[in-house]
Image (cartoon, helix red, strand yellow):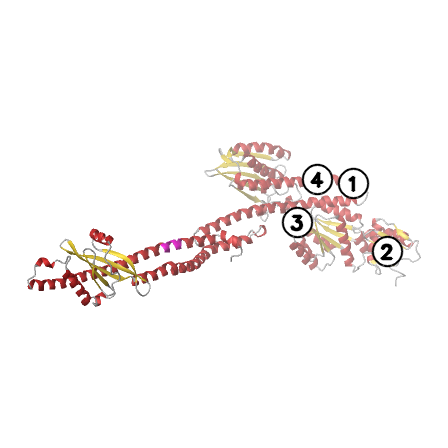
Amino acid sequence: MRILVIEDEKKVAEFIRRGLREEGYAVDLARDGDEGLDMAEGAEYDLVLLDIMLPKKDGFRVCEAVRSKGLDMPILMLTARDDVKDKVRGLDAGADDYLTKPFAFEELLARIRALVRKRYQRTDARLKVADLVLDPVMHRVTRNTGEIRLTAKEYALLEYLMLNAGTVVTRTMISEHVWDINFDTFTNVIDVYISYLRKKIDRDSETRLIHTIKGRGYMVKEGTPDD
Amino acid sequence: MISKGSTFFRSIRFRFLAWYGLILAATFILFSVVLFVDLRRTLYDKLDDVLLSRAEGVAQSINTYWETEKVEGLRRGAKSSLFSKINNANFVKIANRWVDERSDDPELVDIMVQIYTHEGRLIAYSRTAPFKVRLSERSLERIRKKGAVYQNRSVKLTSGPSQDLRTLIYPVLEGKAVSYIVEVASPLTHVSNALDRLRFLLFLLLPATVIITGLLAGEFLASITLKPLKDMIATVQDITAERLDQRLHVPASKDEIRQLADTFNEMLDKIAESIASQRRFIHDLSHEMRTPLTILRGELDVALKRDRSPDQYRETLQSNLEEIEKISRILDGLLVLARIENEEQTLEKEPCDLVGLVRDTLADIEVLAGQKAIEVDFRSEGEAVVPVNREKMRRVLINLFDNAVKYTAPGGLITVVVSPGHEAVDIAVRDTGAGIPGDELPHIFERFYRSEGSRNGRGFGLGLSIARTIVLAHKGTITCESTPGRGTTFTVTLPV
């Protein structure tokens, strides 16, 4: 899950990045409206956290520009203003949700989860494939065999795979959504993490859920993939 | 209109009506009394004139009878001395004959005639005569003193009620002595009828009319006078702290109502300004507090999410401390600003040597400038003693100098010039800093405005705002000229 944070206040951006990373999100920072817009266009983000009072281009304009370029990732507006007018303007500009500063970090996380859930058109917060269940609220992963302990990175990778369950996820997609930096040439890092996941998830179970699609990438699915 | 009795009786409208009615009633009563008295006298005078002329007519007529009798008597050889009317049986006969023959004269309609001897003994009377008794001693006495005597007398008629009469007792003289007395009387019916009618009109109909029309007119006048007031009350009732932009309609006239409206509107302006200032304070405060509070809360939330090393905790706490200090500084700045705004009216000023003040303040700043290797050049073009609040003006200077040092690159130059003029003194602070872009210039004196260049630097955008507020409180001006890349000049102009 890759999130773009557009925020000019250094310390705010910093704690958001740290907090989100610890939750297993990949986080990129942009310091002003122009930079934010460039970055939003340049990479595929699962969510944009957007401040309104930004240098060069304010949040409303960034939001409109993002939408006019056909990008449809969820946008969560983050601002010091709490006028109804501003909220309406933000939502009308194409934002999906609104959070007023100061906020509880747990609330930010919950809203991010909700927006991501909506993006993948699910109503249940938990992700399920066969007996594999991932609870993004509790950060718990279980199979019939019991709870499976994952590191933050493993968890993020599994969450991304499960969100796209049934479809092929390429290494490029994984590097973009799970890692902050583009790991293009380090795809073996992804392979290593996949093998870690396999060990923890599929080793003790009869049915294997993580499949390698030769030459294309990976897929999480019940049963064998068609090809 | 009248919802509560008690409030109505205390209202201006009631007092207006009461006074209006009272004055109107007093005027009409005076008028009525004068009119009535005057008319009664006129009527009596006229009646008395008629009575007098009738009495004279009667006397003349009787005298003519008597003279004819006398001429005949003389012709018959009677002695002239016998023809005195006093105590003369013949005269009694003559008088009676006159009454018989002449009392039906149309001139004497409604006039009753009685003729007495000089002693008051009745000797002849007309048929309608009312009294038929001798004259009282009192009447005789009055005749002797005053001559003719008018009297109002009431007489009981044989049929019907008593009748009021106006009588004239008229002594007829022979030489200097009263020879006989004529009493004429006329009913007062016409006069008293007229007066009764007038009395009815003046003391019953008129007051009723006056009271009714007076109340209506008074009410009408009160409405006209009070309408602007009522409108005002309605508008004033609509005014709340949330809707202070409402103003009273100021009438075109230059009357007291307009003065009231003007005064009230001026007061509203002052209140609105004061409330706006407080709102601005609260708004700015909450707005400026948000970022440090967000950082505080966010960093703590994230830090508490899991166990961390002492170093990480220390880092978080250190950062939180910085934010708390920032909040304190914002509060201090805002409080200073609010205090100056409130003190605007009561700013204590005393003559102050501006050149000395600038030099003293620069001494402190030069230490800061020295650290950045910035050169400070100060010159004055003469003495400048201006009434200012020394402490406040010092703050203005510190803020301007501090700004100049902050935005001037190492090795730059700050020039301070004090130039006294006839009406004002200019203090110019010029730096060789980065300058301020044209589109930002109009905003730099706004609270919490931070230019793009200074946004992540220190300061909260209150320094210039405080400086401007203080200068304005001195009735002075503060302006800024800037060329990006070349430098900025702030000029404070203070009236002498």
Toward which corner of the image does residue B173 lie, by quadrant? bottom left
Q: Which mark is residue B312?
A: 1
**Labels 1 & 2 near each other (Cβ < 8 A):** no
Prevailing secondary structure class for the magenta stretch in the rendered image: helix
Residue with the mark numbered 3: A55
| Residue B23, visible in the rendered structure | yes
Per the image, label 1 sits on a secondary structure element best described as: helix
> Which amino acid, mark 1?
Gln
Image location (x, y in percent) of residue B182: 20, 59
Of circles 1 and 2, the one toward us is 2
> Which amino acid, mark 3?
Pro
Judge if badges 1 and 2 mark residues of a common chain.
Answer: no
The answer for how far apart the CA atoms under marks 2 and 3 are is: 43 Å
The answer for how far apart the CA atoms under marks 4 and 2 are is: 43 Å
Left or right of residue B387, residue A116 in this image: right
Residue range in magenta is B23-29
Mark 1 or mark 4, which has the lower sequence index? Answer: 1
Judge if badges 3 and 1 mark residues of a common chain.
Answer: no
Q: Residue at x 35, y 54 (%)?
A: B30
Q: On what subunit does the disc labeled 1 rest?
A: B
Image location (x, y in percent) of residue A70: 71, 60
